[in-house]
Image: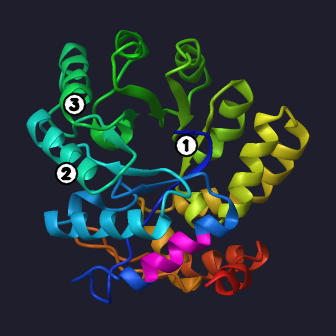
C-alpha cells in the first residue's frame, strides 16, 4: 500500500436536508478524484462527517467506495471513536467491508494522557484488523498526540503512519525524524503541506483536494521531486481556496463548493449548518478563477 501524494479526505454528500446518503453524488466525487490522479481516498473521516453517520450509513458508504474504487487506489476508513473498544469494533467493520487502512483520530473530548494514547493506538493496531494511520488534530479533539508518544508507536506492528494536522514546522521536523520503511508522515494541513513535503513528508491528507484534486496532486508531485519553485507557484494559486475552506468549520465551506461543482448538496448534518451567505460570492469567484467549475462538470 502506497501512502503518498494527495490523499483526499472525502466529504459525504447527503440528499437534500441531510436525511440520507446521496450515493450518486458520492460516485461523481470519487470519479472526479480518480480522474485527477488522487492517490488515496479517506471515507467517513472528519471531513466526511463520520461522527454524524449511523452504523448502517457507514457500512453503505464504505462498501460503495470500495466497490467504486475497485482497488485503483487505497481506500482508508475513518474509524476513530471516543473509546478504544468502539474504535476496535469500527475498525473491524471497516476491514470486513474491504478498506485498506484505518485513519484513527485521537479520542475527542475524553482527553486521555499520553500513556492512554499509547495504549489506545497499540490496542487498535493489535485487534482492529487493519493497518492504522494515527491522526493528530488537537484543534478538533482537544487532545495532542506528542512526538515522544509517536516515537513509542512507530515500531508497533500494524501502525503505518501519522496524519499530523498541527501546522508547526518544528513539530513536523520531530515527526519526520521518526520515518522508517514501515512508517510514513503525512501532512494534515493544506496551507503548510508544501513545506512539509519539501522537508520529507510523503504527502497530504487534504480537504482542498475535494475541490481541486488535480492541483493538489500536482503540488505534491512537484514538492516531492524537490521542485520548490513549481510547488510554491501552484500552491500560491490555491491560497484563496485554503482561506475559504477555513472560513467556517470544516466541512461547511467544502460542501458549499462541491454543490457549486455539481458534486453534492451544500447542507451538512446538524449541528453543522450550511455556509453563511456572506461567503457565497467570494466562494463563487474563487471557483471560477481557478477554472474548477468547468473541470468538475466535465469530469461528471
Q: What's the CA distance linking mark 2 and mark 1?
A: 28 Å
Give the x, y percent position of residue 24. Answer: 42, 85
Q: Is residue 217 left or right of residue 64?
A: right
Q: Quadrant of residue 102?
A: top left
Residues at circles 2 and 3 in contact by the CB criterion of under 8 Å:
no
Q: Could you say which is closer to the camera, residue 180 or residue 200?
A: 180
Q: Quadrant of residue 203?
A: top right
On-image quarter of the C terminus: bottom right
Q: Secondary structure at mark 3?
A: helix
For marks 1 and 3, the one nearer the N-term is 3
Measuring 71% from the left and 76% from the top, which residue is drawn there?
A: 292
Q: Is residue 276 visible?
A: no
Dot 1 surroundings within 10 Å: few (below 14), some, or many (20 or more)? many
Foreground disc of the pair 1, 3: 3
Q: Secondary structure at mark 1?
A: loop
**Where is mark 3, residue-wise?**
124
Measuring 52% from the left and 18% from the top, which residue is drawn there?
A: 175
Give the x, y percent position of residue 103. Answer: 36, 42
For marks 2 and 3, the one nearer the N-term is 2
Q: Is residue 83 left or right of residue 13?
A: left
- The range drawn in magenta is 25-32
Dot 2 surroundings within 10 Å: few (below 14), some, or many (20 or more)? many
Q: Is residue 200 left or right of residue 42?
A: right
Q: Is residue 180 visible?
A: yes
Q: What's the CA distance linking mark 1 and mark 3?
A: 24 Å
Q: What's the CA distance linking mark 2 and mark 3?
A: 13 Å
Q: Could you say which is closer to the camera, residue 160 or residue 50?
A: 160
**Where is mark 1, residue-wise?**
189
Q: Could you say which is closer to the camera, residue 268 or residue 8?
A: 8
Measuring 23% from the left and 52% from the top, which residue is drawn there?
A: 96
**Where is mark 2, residue-wise?**
93
Image height of 51 relative to 154, above or below? below
Amino acid at each position: 500500500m502506497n501512502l503518498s501524494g494527495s490523499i483526499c479526505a472525502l466529504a459525504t454528500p447527503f440528499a437534500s436536508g441531510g436525511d440520507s446518503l446521496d450515493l450518486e453524488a458520492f460516485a461523481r466525487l470519487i470519479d472526479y478524484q480518480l480522474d485527477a490522479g488522487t492517490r488515496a481516498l479517506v471515507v467517513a473521516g472528519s471531513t466526511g462527517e463520520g461522527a454524524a453517520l449511523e452504523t448502517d450509513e457507514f457500512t453503505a458508504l464504505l462498501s460503495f467506495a470500495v466497490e467504486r474504487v475497485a482497488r485503483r487506489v487505497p481506500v482508508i476508513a475513518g474509524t476513530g471513536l471516543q473509546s478504544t473498544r468502539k474504535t476496535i469494533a469500527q475498525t473491524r467493520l471497516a476491514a470486513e467491508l474491504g478498506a485498506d487502512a484505518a485513519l484513527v483520530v485521537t479520542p475527542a473530548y475524553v482527553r486521555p494522557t499520553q500513556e492512554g494514547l499509547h495504549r489506545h493506538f497499540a490496542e487498535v493496531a493489535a485487534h482492529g484488523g487493519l493497518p492504522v494511520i494515527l491522526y493528530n488534530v488537537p484543534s478538533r479533539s482537544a487532545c495532542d498526540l506528542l512526538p515522544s508518544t509517536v516515537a513509542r508507536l512507530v515500531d508497533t506492528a500494524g501502525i503505518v503512519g501519522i496524519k499530523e494536522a498541527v501546522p508547526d514546522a518544528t513539530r513536523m521536523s520531530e515527526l519526520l525524524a521518526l520515518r522508517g520503511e514501515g512508517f510514513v508522515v503525512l501532512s494534515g494541513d493544506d496551507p503548510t503541506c508544501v513545506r512539509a513535503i519539501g522537508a520529507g513528508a510523503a504527502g497530504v491528507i487534504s480537504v482542498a483536494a475535494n475541490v481541486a484534486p488535480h492541483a493538489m496532486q500536482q503540488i505534491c508531485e512537484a514538492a516531492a521531486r524537490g521542485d520548490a519553485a513549481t510547488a510554491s507557484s501552484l500552491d500560491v494559486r490555491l491560497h484563496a481556496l485554503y482561506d475559504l475552506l477555513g472560513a467556517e468549520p470544516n466541512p461547511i465551506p467544502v460542501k458549499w463548493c462541491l454543490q457549486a461543482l455539481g458534486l453534492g448538496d451544500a447542507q451538512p448534518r446538524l449541528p453543522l449548518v450550511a455556509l453563511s451567505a456572506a461567503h457565497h460570492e467570494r466562494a463563487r469567484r474563487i471557483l471560477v478563477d481557478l477554472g474548477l467549475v468547468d473541470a468538475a462538470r466535465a469530469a461528471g
